[in-house]
Structure formats: structure tokens, C-alpha cells
Amino acid sequence: MGQFLLVDSRKLDGFEGLHQAVHGSHVDVMQLGRGRLRGTLSHIGIDDFSLSIGAFNVGMRTQRVSSDDKLIIGMLLAAEDRVAHWSFDMQLNDVLVIPPLLEHDGVFHGASAYAAMRFDLAEVTSLFGGEAQLSDPDTWRSRGHFRADLQTGAIASRRLVRIMSHLRTCNGSLTPSTSDFWKRSIVECMAANVMSSLPPDDEGWLPSARRLIRRVEDYLDETGTRPVHVSEICAALGVSRRTLHRAFQEVFGLGPVSFLRHKRLCAVHSILRDCAPGSTTVAAVAMQQGFYELGRFSQYYLAMFGERPSQTLGVSPLQTAGESIANA
């Protein structure tokens, strides 16, 4: 009996599409770079095993809550700027291990591409058979970063893309033997980089900065949806504005003011995208998120997403103009 093959490829139009960055696992995302996000996202699934390959054109922050009981192993395929996951500074073709039930935090400072496979930890022994250390499930229970060999990594990266391209042309199902072959072929690409690397690098860059930012985000979660000023954060956490600024610059390449503004802009974008025209106004949503100078808000929004907020909401320019005249 054949095994069902899931194939799903789509173009990305907005950062929200990256909520499904890894097939079967929800990822929280926030746009950091300016411009309208464009990209592609492809998934192939063979029963509970999946491979996802995504590419996008602006900086992103990704987080994944600790509710997923699957092992995720990823590879950085391309990056125009710095990429960091947790405290690991990534280079091209490096491999990242995200164990089951562990929170994940990543920052892409520019256009990037990645591959990620997701499967049950119980499959490790069979899929990595022949390599004693890799076939031990305990090897994958801790987060890890494996530095890729330049030559081996480039070959593995190209092979993953070719495998995805090939499987996208298949229809419907695979035989048990071909299913096993393709899963092993995908795993082998990741394993090649792991085996050629040094042991996992547990020493990351600026862990203290990341710890401070985690405290900031915990505080923001506690405050709910209301806008929060930087001075309030400094007072609440007992840190200077200079310390806070340095931490955000090192981790995100943005100051805390810009980061908070980007976060609020992303919230506005998601709300407008989900609302039907006529159910709310741009001004109402913007003010709910703390943007009181609507002219400046519109400039920020256009620079960030490459479109006006009324376009996201689906309101025509004529309707917007009519509302402005009516309210004058």
C-alpha cells in the first residue's frame, strides 16, 4: 500500500504566510525589515515526516512556542545578512537542532532561505542508522548548532532543493520503499553537515543581551495590547536606556524604539488583513496600537510593508478619500 505524499507550494504575500514556515508547526513571526514581504514556501509531507523550504526578501523575527512534540532540524540555505537562532550565529548551510517541546527564537536580518525537516524523535534510530551518535535519540534532545563544512554544506544545500523540486512533480502517493528512500535522502543532507562539523557550539554571542530582551518581551506580554514606552520598560526592569539600546542593536539591528514600533505595525497589519472592509477603520486600529499621529503612522506603514494601510484593509482610494471629506 502506498504512502500519501503531501505537496504544497505557494507564494508569500505578507509576513503572515510564514506562520506555516515549518509544516505542521505554528511559528510566530514579526517583520523587522522594511518593504512588502515577498517569497515562496514549499512543503512536502510523507506521513508524519515533512520537509519545508522557504525564502523571503526582508528581515524577520521567528518564534515557536513549546507545544510541538516533533524534532525539527533546519539548515540555512541563503542569507544576505546576519542570521541568529537563540545565541547561535549562523553561517551558510549550518544545521540547527530544535528538540521537541522547546521554545525557539530566531532573527533574520535580511533576505534569507532555509530548509527544515520535522519528524518524530522515535524515527531517529531508523533514519540515522549507521551513525552511532546520530541514531541515538538522546543526541537530539538538546538544542544544537552544527557548523557546516564549506564544500559539503554547499552540496547538501543544492541536493535538498533538487529533492524538493523532484517531489513537487510527483502525484498522490509513494510506495513504502520510495517513501523510505526519499526520507533518508533528505535526512542525509542534514546529517552530512552535522558529521563534518565540530560538536554543538554551546557558547553563543551576547547571551546576556538575549536574556535582557527575553525579560522585556515577558514584560510586554504581561502588559497586554496597550502601547508601552521605552522609559516604562527601563524603570520596570531596572536597566538604563543605553543598556537596553545596546542589547536590541546587537540582537535585532534595531533600537528598542524602532523594535516596539515594528511590533505595533505588525499588529496593525495583521488586524487590518483579517478585517472585512467596513467593519473598522484604519484610524481606529492604528490608535488602538498607540499610533496617535496618523500621518506619521501612514508613512511608517508604507515604508514597512510597501502598501498603504487602506490597501491592506481592502478599502479603495476613492472610499478613503470620501471618508476624509466626510470627516473634515
Image: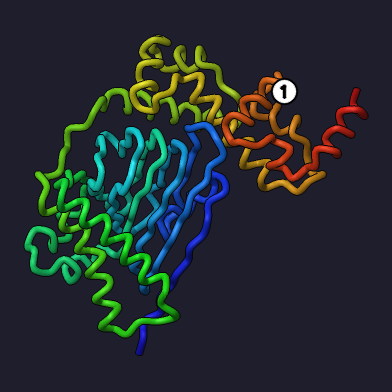
Q: Is residue 179 above or below residue 319?
A: below
Q: In this view, does 75 lie to the left or right of 293?
A: left
Q: SS for tag 1?
A: helix
How crowded pointer 1 is (Cα within 10 Å; few <14, some 14-19, many 20+) is rated as few
Residue 139 coordinates in the image, percent (x, y): 15, 54
Residue bearing mark 1: 294
Give residue 88's position: percent from left, percent from top: 25, 36
In this view of the protein, which residue sits in the foreground, 236 or 18?
18
**In the image, is 272 to the left or to the right of 101?**
right
Amino acid type for the residue under numbered disc 1:
Leu
Q: In the rendered view, would you say 250 is above or below 106?
A: above
Please, is residue 14 above or below residue 176 in the view?
Answer: above
Q: Which of 82 and 207 is in front in this view?
A: 82
Q: What residue is at 21 percent from the left and 44 percent from the top? A: 145
Left or right of residue 283, residue 61 in this image: left
Residue in the image at 39% along x and 28% along y = 252
Q: How many labels does the image show?
A: 1
Please identify the residue farthest to the right as the structure is shown: 326
- Between 215 and 163, the one lying in front of the other is 163
From this view, report whether residue 24 is shown above or below residue 178. Answer: above
Kindly identify the residue that appears in the image at 21 percent across and 32 percent down: 204
